[in-house]
Amino acid sequence: MKMISQHMKKLGMGSLLLASAWLFPAAAHADRLADIQARGILVCATLANNEPLGYPDPQTRQVVGFDVDMCAAVARKLGVQMQQKSVTVEARLPALIHGEADLVSAALGYTRERAHQIDFTASHYQNPIKLIVQSDSGLNLVSDLADKRISANRSSTPEQAARRVLPKATVLGFVDTPQAFLALAQGKVDALAISMPSGVRFVNESTGRFRFVEGALAWEPTALGVKKGEHRLLAAVNQGLMEMEKEGEIDALWSRWFGPKTKFNIPRDKKLTPIASLR
């Protein structure tokens, strides 16, 4: 009887293990990189209304821009095609977390808070977060906005920087950059907090109506994002970025969208930098 009991226990344990493997196969074998390679497509999320990062081409109506080209280049390094997916600033992280995108290239600034939710590649560029004001406002320094009203993209690093650096200011979050800028243009706020590459066009195209204040709220390391725990995909994308940097491809893409022959004319002073060294 004792031997039969022990045999039954072994059978029971084996059945339990078998059931566990049947119930949770995805957890045991999840590998986003393998999925991407199997389907031959990298789904990459970008912004769709932020020139020159991601915006509709006037002729083709396709979303184009620096972030889109970065996605396409990474896809080539992985040996697959790129499928662009448009997201808002607020939807960037959820798109990764819920598996709606494999990679995010959407003005994604690194923060420690975000790093608890997703994984970041090395930072491929860094830019100052600036404040734009109306030229006749009399506001000249970041400190002049200490108790003013400031607009920003909701859930963006400029919004976070404004709240952190200017805790007494009233910071209003908007769903996208055009709406945040419109609030400034209509006098509903005193300043717009924005990454410099995104803000340059508003200043340059305003015929002198708007300008940057002196100084920066912060420097923003920008990277690509992958789903938390997808170590093979993260390593593969980082390897691709390293090769692109070495081959001068990132510089070439930057020059195409931000270089001296564009209306932005912003240098790429900081090269590919591991996130670990920026923490």
Image (cartoon, rainbow, N blue to C red):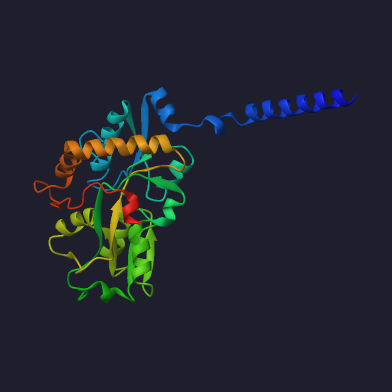
Image position of 184 (left or right of 247): right
Measured as percent of width and height from the top left, residue 267 is found at 15, 52
Residue 136 versus residue 182 in the image, above or below: below
> Residue, x 46% and y 45% (percent of image)?
94
Residue 55 in which image quadrant: top left
Towards the viewer: 246 or 127: 246
The residue lying furthest to the left in this view is: 261
Taking the spot 38% from the left edge, 72% from the top edge, the residue there is 167
**Above or below 232: residue 111:** below
Q: Considering the image in quadrants, where does the C terminus appear?
A: bottom left
**Residue 5 occupies which quadrant of the picture?**
top right
Position of 27 with respect to 85 (left or right) is right
Q: Residue furthest right?
A: 1
Q: Is residue 82 above or below residue 265?
A: above
x, y percentage for residue 83?
34, 31
Q: Nearer the viewer, residue 152 or 163?
A: 163
Q: How many marks?
A: 0
Q: Position of residue 215 (x, y in %)?
A: 21, 68
Q: Is residue 98 left or right of residue 9?
A: left
Q: Quadrant of the N terminus?
A: top right
Q: Which residue shows up at 76% across the image and 26% down it?
A: 10
Residue 23 seen from this side: yes
| Identity of the residue drawn at 52% across and 29% down | 29
Above or below, comparing residue 271 to residue 211 in the picture: above
Residue 186 shows in this picture: no
Q: Position of residue 181 (x, y in %)?
A: 28, 59
